[in-house]
Amino acid sequence: MSSIAVMASVDIVALRLEPEAQRLEVLLHRREREPHLSQWALPGVIVNGRTPDNSLDAAAERALQEKAQVVPRHMEQVGTEGNAFRDPRGWSLSTYYMALLDPAQSVDGERLAFVDVASILARKVVLPFDHAVLIQRACERLAAKSSYSSLPLYLLPERFTVLDAVGATQACLGRAVNGTSLRKRLDRLKEVGWVLDTGERQQPRLGRPQQIYRHLPADTGPFLFERSLLPEG
Amino acid sequence: MSSIAVMASVDIVALRLEPEAQRLEVLLHRREREPHLSQWALPGVIVNGRTPDNSLDAAAERALQEKAQVVPRHMEQVGTEGNAFRDPRGWSLSTYYMALLDPAQSVDGERLAFVDVASILARKVVLPFDHAVLIQRACERLAAKSSYSSLPLYLLPERFTVLDAVGATQACLGRAVNGTSLRKRLDRLKEVGWVLDTGERQQPRLGRPQQIYRHLPADTGPFLFERSLLPEG
DNA sequence: AAAATAGTGTCTATTAGACAATATGTC
DNA sequence: GACATATTGTCTAATAGACACTATTTT
């Protein structure tokens, strides 16, 4: 049985919207063991028959709790990367999940930090293993789905404005987004009950106050629109 | 190292369009070892450091060649299922791929057969492990993407008619599809060079002859439309 | 009042879909 | 010619997007 076995782990690409510049950040964890001891890497856990997990999803939950110490608004499996080179110890597998966090999620301690995704993808920050690739794949998934779904709203706090929604969508897509279109989408989401209109207002530094929308606490899955936001306009 | 290891495999959900009724069939392989020896199951291979595969994708290719003995027009990873119960030997992982075959793909020998997908999902045919779940997930992925992409065309022979395209799309989506819409989509695919108009005709039993389209031999990835085919009409 | 920002209304473009009209073959 | 089937053309509906216009607040 050991001859048919391989190292396997679950890694979490937990994404947060940085409040100021509305750019994506990924949660990294300082490694507690070799290889790459004490380097910043994706939080993850080993999976095997001796760990307490009954399933991959359960292992992902445990990784979130034990290592990342955050509660995501949404989580989904993205894929599995497996080859002979990604881990110096030999053939290994990593099933990686995308988790979307409330921007208010903060981390304490020396072992956790949020790092700008763009600087990782540009290789300005270098991660061990193939973690940069996993982050890239997760962001590609996020971008693809963001065009035709309400997925970016999982990156917003429970109460948010139209401008927040535009910013989140732009961060996910990596390009400008039409405000009118996003307003219409929020109207649609209001119709189906995916978001609520609180009736409350919020005063920006200057100008007319903003309507405050609210999303539901539970992850009911993203709403799928019938058309995509278009590349140019 | 053996204490941090787990059983892992790659399984292939190879789908074919049954020529007559235009229903989806999946390729099954009679198992050559325990557990579930000589039962029909998904073709797959073990992955670990001792097998010749450099990567998961390479293992998937090997599974196709050695076990399934078919060459797909398209293949993509769908996901990974892992838990303590799916294999009687203990905790195990299966990364499973969706492969789309030419309907002319046939199999010879006693160890391979195409089986109607619907009867598997309805549990009229019972498969070992959680293979029915893997097939279901692959079909869900196929249905989701078929609504907004040219994925169903990978199930067609190189030369096909509009009616073939309608049939394939219906089989993938599991519901009726508007013929006019599909014609327009084929026009769009012709514009971008994803399909070609051969100029040739084919005579059905009765009536006006059908135009014959042709797709390119290489898998350039599905074309993504900006809108979905709509649920009712 | 001026400036800034939010939100609304109107128009266009695109594409799915319904369906009538036409083309082209077999019997 | 009758019939079957394929294809084209016309119209509608829905929604993304552009943009002018209005609303509401601060300074």
Image: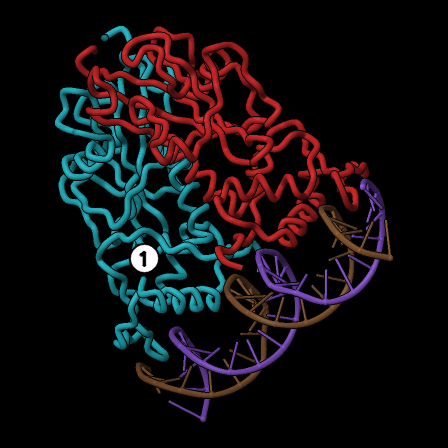
Chain colours: A cyan, B red, C purple, D brown
> Residue A208: horizontal and vertical position, in percent?
36, 80
The number of numbered discs placed on residues in the rendered structure image is 1
Task: Give me the residue at 17% from left, 35% from top.
Answer: A62
Disc 1 crowd rating (10 Å Cα; few below 14, some 14-19, many 20+) is few
**Which element is circle 1 on?**
loop
Q: Is residue B232 above or below residue A115?
A: below
Query: Is residue A46 visible in this depiction of the protein?
Result: no
Query: Is residue A19 visible in this depiction of the protein?
Result: yes
Quadrant holding the N terminus of chain B: top left
Task: Give me the residue at 33% from left, 12% from top.
Answer: B48
Using the image as rendered, state which of residue B68 and residue A91 is in the foreground. Answer: B68
Instruction: Give the quadrant of residue A35.
Output: top left
Q: Is residue A71 above or below residue A164?
A: above
Chain designation of label 1: A
Task: Give me the residue at 29% from left, 57% from top.
Answer: A156
Question: Does residue B118 appear left or right of residue A220 in this picture?
Answer: right
Q: Which residue is mark 1?
A: A20
> Residue A50: horizontal and vertical position, in percent?
14, 20
> Residue A132: horizontal and vertical position, in percent?
37, 32
Using the image as rendered, state which of residue A39 and residue B80 is in the foreground. Answer: B80
Q: Amino acid at mark 1?
A: Glu
Quadrant holding the C terminus of chain B: bottom right
Question: Does residue B201 appear left or right of residue B51 in this picture?
Answer: right
Using the image as rendered, state which of residue B113 and residue B35 is in the foreground. Answer: B113
Q: Is residue B39 above or below residue B200?
A: above
> Residue A137: horizontal and vertical position, in percent?
41, 36
Q: Is residue C7 above or below residue B190?
A: below
Task: Give me the residue at 77% from left, 36% from top.
Answer: B202
